[in-house]
Image (tube, rainbow, N blue to C red):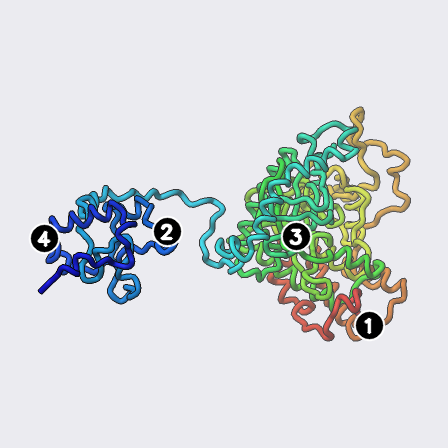
Amino acid sequence: MDHSEDKDTKLPAAPQQHQHPSAQAITSRQQQWPQAETRYNQQATYIPHQNPYQQALPGQNNVMAASDMMNIPPYPQQRQPQSIYQTGVYPHFNAQQPYPPQPMYYQQQPPPAGPPLQQIAYPPHPFIQPNIGRLPSDRPLVKLSVSLIDTYKRINTVYYEERDARRAARSKEKGKSQGTYNNGWDDEHYDYIVTPGEMFHGRYKIKERIGKGSFGQVVRAEDIETKQEVAIKIIKSKKPFLMQAKTEIELLTHLSEKDSDDQHNIVRLLTHFMYRNHQCLVFEMLSLNLYELLKNTQFGGVSLNLIRKFAKQVLKALSFLARKDVDVIHCDLKPENILLRHPKKSGVKVIDFGSSCRSNKRMYSYIQSRFYRSPEVMLGLPYSVAIDMWSLGCILVEMHTGEPLFSGSDQFDQMQKIVKTLGMVPSAMLDRANEQNRQQFFDLEKSPSGKSIWKLRQTKRSTTKDSTSTSSQPKEDDAPKTLIVPSSDPVASLSEVVQSGPRQKKKFPPVDTLNSPQNYALFVDLVHKMLAYEPSERITPLEALDHPFIAEQAMVPVSVAQNPAGG
């Protein structure tokens, strides 16, 4: 068979005049490897290199593309295109005649892997909490994806917080004139200079100040994470106040642990933190206090039906505090420290444990607000949870009459008003009293029979430093206008006070169904037992909850919003 024509035959895809020298070298090299035919037939078929610019170029000018060192990785059979079995780059190799063998360094095994990297266990970040109980919106994935804008806003707020607050503090005219207190953050009373819109702790946006006292101030704020309003108690930056706040935090934490279900009408401490040398306590936001409610009635008082509702809830709180495993004395129970949960409902909670203590760790001797101060505290005797029952008895009468039961101008006048209504303090109690405290209110005199008896002083004892006599001469302003005579019938005196308050003087509409004589008698009996002189004889919170006045069901549903007086 004559093959002379085959020698002159030229492939159309790669004209001989344009064939690259590297292609000729590959052809000659393939002729030197006879075993390559058998070897490569057993391997996967390779797709020839396709030059997309072959038709446009007169020849292959890309040296790298035509180099024998360039090998194309194998493709599976089903992915091989049928239209590129032959190219102009390697015209002598196609699907029937595979590529030349790969260079040796392509056939080598990869170097052995080194030892595995050690996993370093980093300590958990203090601000990273587990997902237990976490809302879906609090998850890091949500905050870094759909809530990314809110996350950036939070970061910017924290970043610019200190700069903006410092500018606001410097702009305070009082701070400029009085000098600097606490690096310019406080006024002359060491109260923090609050600026509306300021961000506390990177989370709480201040709205306004809603209260102020000897401890510091209370502001309304918004929790930007939960979108809920909270009340922040900002303690003064002085060390004694900070130490007292530490005790309050310990007590509130203890109460929260014992009342985990929030069933005993005690305010909830949400969290606490230090902010510019001020201890801040974050509480749930409540509504009006009972004094503000009384003010809304023009000090006309509320009905006995509403008083029953208030008393039952406060007694439940006091019975919880009196438990042996709780053992907390509030020490400052008054209308301002009993708050409505909601402005349109009669639910209440007890707040402000800044003066509170344990019965075995009494820290102060001068406690309780004057109008609600118990006689054992005034006489310097040891006190217990019974002092809170005395305060509650005074509060219940005030909530009905519209004015304090014992409104003394000072401690001496306070004792005068107590004795005038409830009668003389028992002699056994006065015998145990602190001598210095007792001499402020009582004198020991001889009776005609020669027996020593205690008498109520009619004049205030002088407290001037140059006084050397134990029986000082009173000043003209101290002389009483009328002689104070101790009551001989405390129940009758209480009944007269309860039924002759501003509510009757202002001629409020009659509410015979609610304020019936029977209800008045039960109410006076309960108050009289709350105001027993001897703490051991005073009614306890648990006993008061079983009293007929408290145990009786309310006759008519009460809405504070519709009728603040509850009648």
Q: Disc 4 marks which amino acid?
A: Pro
Nearer-N-terminus badge (2/4)? 4
Q: Give the Cα separation between the discs numbered 3 and 4.
A: 86 Å
Horizontal side of residue 476 vs 529, given as left or right: right
Where is mark 2, residue-wise?
A: 57
Quadrant assignment, res 451: top right
> Which residue bears the numbered disc 1?
511
In the drawing, does residue 169 fall left or right of residue 21?
right
User: Quarter holding the C terminus?
Assistant: bottom right
| Observer-nearest of 134 and 81 | 81
Label 4, residues with CA under 10 Å away: few <14, some 14-19, many ≥20: few
Residue beneath disc 3: 222
Looking at the rendering, which quadrant does residue 457 occupy?
top right
For the residue pair 421 and 108, the one nearer the viewer reads as 108
Which is in the foreground here, disc 1 or disc 3? 3
Is disc 2 placed on a helix, strand or loop? loop
Residue at the spot 73% in from the left edge and 57% down from the top edge? 288
Q: Secondary structure at mark 3?
A: strand
Disc nearer the start of the sequence (1/3):
3
At x 33%, y 46%, the residue is 61
Q: Which quadrant of the figure contains the N terminus?
A: bottom left
Q: Looking at the image, is mark 2 or mark 1 nearer the viewer?
A: 2
Instruction: Measure the alpha-carbon separation of dots 2 and 3.
Output: 73 Å
Q: Residue furthest top?
A: 466
Mark closer to the chain start, 2 or 1: 2
Residue 359 in view here: no
Question: Is residue 68 left or right of 201 when viewed as pictured?
Answer: left
For residue 231, side relative to residue 129 (left or right): right
Q: Earlier in the sequence, mark 3 or mark 4?
A: 4
Circle 4 residue:
34
| Badge 1 amino acid | Val
